[in-house]
């Protein structure tokens, strides 16, 4: 059913991508290797052995992509900088050719009237830093701050929002806990150390950016906050399972960043894994650096129950198969299959979770402006006989989730913008090119870009600030 929901004129509409997922040119222009190059080139780590070597070839086609954004009427573009492209070793010398690429991209965006929203780290750690211990090593946080400071000097006030990290939950728990993401380690203590060093890196980088650009620089971090439901809402054990997962997933980041403290229950829940001695005096003050806007990524919900240790423990949290769990110390929690419908990721579609999440963050942090920095869906779309991609399930997903953002705004949440994930089909990490999230299709044989119905629909939304009906999408364009 169509909705006439309208959004305010100052609300920012954009789309998002990440460097390793679209850029390609992995060994060109002085770029060094990242942990995702190493991981994706290791047999068995990604579906079909896919790598980001070519991806959507964005490095060579960025002007065409910016023209596409302009044509879609996008007001903002959220992209990430590949740290190994601008500083191949992760420390020491910077690479002028890599810096020039991002400088040119930013200029092209501004000329096209598209505001550049930068993410400094979207998972592609320079390999030499991983060789020295990666995010489990405190030194990585200091290297990150040096890199952030240099990018602030290079890109300066041309950047609308500076986002330090994308989804540190994934970097820490999937990279060092379950090992389904690079660098593929399965060490619970290292995962929790990574949580802290990522938080520290955020705080140090925020200070570095403000040190160069002053308080006018808009600072952000993007978190994939989890909406966690109890399997049995009347079970105290299941509610405790919710508390434990929320602590690991959400409060491990919100606590230090917005309150200046790790939650006591998180520290005690994980006491058998680590003593948290990696938190040093002064760290929490650095981490709690004022945020202009908190980036929120939302896709679906999770459901948990208490697990008493008998029978097989289901491990279906939608983040890929691994013998190790990303949920460090939560051995008495099991993830339960959610009711459908599902996207091609197997993630349940639940728009009300978007409203619930925004309202819950707003209730705890009423003065914190929020921005949806990712939301979208993978589906198995096809090019039709008419040459178009009629991706009505994606249009419907976007419609219902954007409507849910509007509902949260009506109820008082201060949401400043929405970025659809993703501008184009891309390398979906362990799932390679098999899962398509784009509103623009990439033909991986020819690298042709084909705007899907969802892209036409999104353009109409941005143009009118009013939610178009799902049914109208096939006629737009
Ligand atoms: O593709 C990813 C992105 O890199 C981070 N957020 C979730 C997306 C979909 O899995």
Image: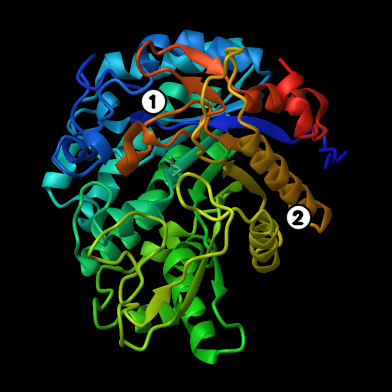
Residue 403, compared with residue 459, is above or below; it is below
x 67%, y 57%: residue: 358
Q: Does the rendering let one see residue 148?
A: yes
Dot 2 falls on a residue whose secondary structure is helix
* Residue 171, numbered circle: none
In the displayed structure image, the side of residue 353 where residue 428 appears, left or right: left
Q: Is residue 197 visible?
A: no
Residue 455 sits in quarter? top right
Q: Is residue 187 above or below residue 130?
A: below
For the residue pair 431 and 31, the one nearer the viewer reads as 431
Q: Quadrant of ligand 1?
A: top left
Q: Residue at x 46, y 52 (%)?
A: 346
Q: Quadrant of residue 310?
A: bottom left
The verdict on label 1 being within 8 Å of ligand 1 is no
Q: Position of residue 386 (x, y in %)?
A: 61, 12
Q: Report crowding for label 2: few under 14, some 14 to 19, many 20 or more residues within 10 A (C-alpha).
A: many
Quadrant in which the C terminus appears: top right
Counting the numbered discs, the total is 2
Q: Position of residue 187 (x, y in %)?
A: 19, 65
Which mark, by number, is residue 22? 1
Give the residue at the far right of this rendering.
4
Instruction: Identify the element where label 1 is drawn.
Output: helix
Query: Quadrant of the rendered structure where residue 77 is?
Result: top right
Q: Nearer the viewer, residue 314 or 302?
A: 314
Q: Residue at x 63, y 45 (%)?
A: 371
| 129 to the left or right of 146 | left
Q: Label 2 belongs to which residue?
A: 408
Q: Is residue 473 left or right of residue 64?
A: right
Which quadrant holds the N terminus? top right
Q: Earlier in the sequence, mark 2 or mark 1?
A: 1
The Cα atoms of the two marked residues, 2 and 1, are separated by: 32 Å
């Amino acid at each position: 059913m169509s909705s006439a929901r309208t959004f305010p004129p100052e609300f920012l509409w954009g789309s998002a991508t990440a460097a390793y997922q679209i850029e390609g040119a992995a060994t060109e222009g002085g770029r060094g290797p990242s942990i995702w190059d190493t991981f994706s080139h290791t047999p068995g780590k990604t579906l079909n052995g896919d790598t980001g070597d070519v991806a959507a070839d964005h490095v060579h086609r960025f002007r065409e992509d910016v023209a596409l954004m302009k044509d879609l009427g996008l007001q903002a573009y959220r992209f990430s900088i590949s740290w190994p492209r601008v500083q191949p070793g992760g420390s020491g010398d910077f690479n002028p050719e890599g810096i020039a690429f991002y400088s040119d991209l930013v200029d092209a965006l501004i000329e096209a009237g598209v505001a550049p929203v930068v993410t400094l780290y979207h998972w592609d750690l320079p390999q030499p830093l991983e060789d020295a211990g990666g995010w489990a090593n405190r030194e990585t946080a200091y290297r990150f701050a040096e890199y952030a400071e240099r990018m602030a000097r290079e890109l300066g006030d041309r950047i609308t929002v500076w986002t330090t990290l994308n989804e540190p939950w994934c970097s820490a728990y999937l990279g060092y806990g379950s090992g389904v993401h690079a660098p593929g380690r399965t060490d619970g203590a290292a995962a929790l150390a990574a949580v802290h060093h990522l938080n520290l890196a955020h705080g140090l980088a925020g200070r570095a950016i403000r040190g160069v650009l002053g308080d006018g620089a808009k600072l952000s971090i993007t978190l994939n906050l989890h909406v966690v439901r109890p399997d049995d809402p009347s079970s105290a054990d299941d509610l405790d399972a919710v508390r434990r997962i929320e602590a690991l997933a959400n409060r491990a980041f919100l606590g230090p960043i917005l309150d200046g403290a790790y939650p006591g229950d998180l520290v005690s829940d994980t006491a058998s894994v680590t003593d948290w001695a990696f938190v040093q005096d002064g760290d929490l003050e650095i981490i709690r650096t004022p945020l202009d806007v908190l980036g929120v990524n939302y896709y679906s919900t999770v459901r948990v129950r208490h697990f008493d240790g008998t029978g097989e423990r289901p491990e279906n949290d939608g983040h890929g198969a691994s013998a190790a769990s990303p949920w460090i110390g939560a051995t008495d929690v099991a993830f339960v299959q959610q009711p459908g419908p599902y996207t091609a990721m197997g993630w349940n579609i639940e728009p009300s979770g978007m409203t619930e999440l925004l309202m819950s963050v707003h209730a705890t942090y009423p003065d914190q402006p929020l921005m949806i920095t990712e939301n979208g869906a993978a589906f198995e779309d096809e090019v039709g006989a008419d040459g178009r991609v009629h991706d009505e399930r994606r249009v419907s997903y976007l419609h219902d989730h954007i409507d849910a953002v509007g509902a949260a705004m009506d109820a008082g949440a201060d949401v400043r913008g929405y970025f659809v994930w993703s501008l184009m089909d891309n390398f979906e990490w362990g799932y390679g090119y098999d899962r398509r999230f784009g509103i623009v299709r990439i033909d991986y044989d020819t690298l042709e870009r084909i705007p899907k119905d969802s892209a036409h629909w999104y353009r109409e939304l941005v143009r009118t600030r009013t939610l178009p009906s799902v049914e109208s999408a096939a006629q737009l364009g």
